[in-house]
Amino acid sequence: MTDAAPARFWLQDQLGFDIERGEGSARATIVCDDRHLNPHGAVHGAVVYALVDTAMGAATMSVLDESSWCATIEIQQRYLAPVFSGPLVADVSVVKAGRRIVHLDARVVDGDGRLVATAAGSYAVIPRPTA
């Protein structure tokens, strides 16, 4: 990973996660606590999804030039094991970067290195809006 971290935004602050970005990759980290739990006491799937989606966006932006942005087309996420607290790490890599679509894969592990989720995503490459 590089020091070139993408700008923070409100969701990162609300959920409390960090993003590191490399060329064609990104890593999102979070330490889950009570605010991240669903009514059954497990980390809510939307927390894991937000972690993956944000990391995929960062990885996509790492392969685009300054004239482009990205937007999520779709993410297929598979939850493999519940998480009840502690750290989660989502590692994302670009599988293929085309002119109009970027395809990515993600693996999410808990603090013990146990694989808890995987995902595949596609992001549209769009022109950066002008003022």
Image (tube, helix red, strand yellow):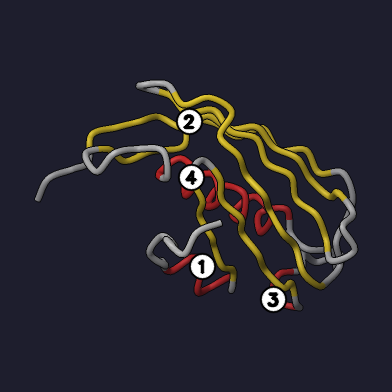
Q: Rounded to the nearest whole Å, what is the CA distance between mark 2 and mark 4?
A: 21 Å
Which secondary structure, mark 2? Answer: strand
Quarter location, residue 43: bottom right
Is 100 situated above or below 32?
Answer: above
Q: Spatial distance from mark 3 to mark 2, Cα to Cα?
A: 28 Å
The residue indicated by pointer 3 is 35
Q: Residue at x 31, y 41 (%)?
A: 69
Where residue 117 appears, as percent x and y from the top left, is 79, 45
- Answer whether labels 4 and 1 touch (C-beta < 8 Å): no
Q: Amino acid at mark 2?
A: Ile
Q: Say which of 111 and 72 sits in front.
A: 111
**Does the residue at mark 2 contact the one at mark 4 (Cβ under 8 Å)?**
no
The answer to whether residue 110 is left or right of residue 32 is right
Q: Which residue is mark 4?
A: 23
Q: Amino acid at mark 3?
A: Arg
Earlier sequence position, callout 1 versus callout 3: 1
Categorize mark 3 by other alpha carbons within 10 Å: few (<14), some (14-19), many (20+).
Answer: few
Q: Identify residue type, mark 1.
A: Gln
The residue wearing badge 1 is: 12
Q: Residue at x 84, y 50 (%)?
A: 116
Q: Which of disc 2 and disc 3 is earlier in sequence?
A: 3
Determine which of the numbered discs, if any, sits on residue 73 in the image: 2
Q: Earlier in the sequence, mark 4 or mark 1?
A: 1
State the SS at label 4.
Answer: loop
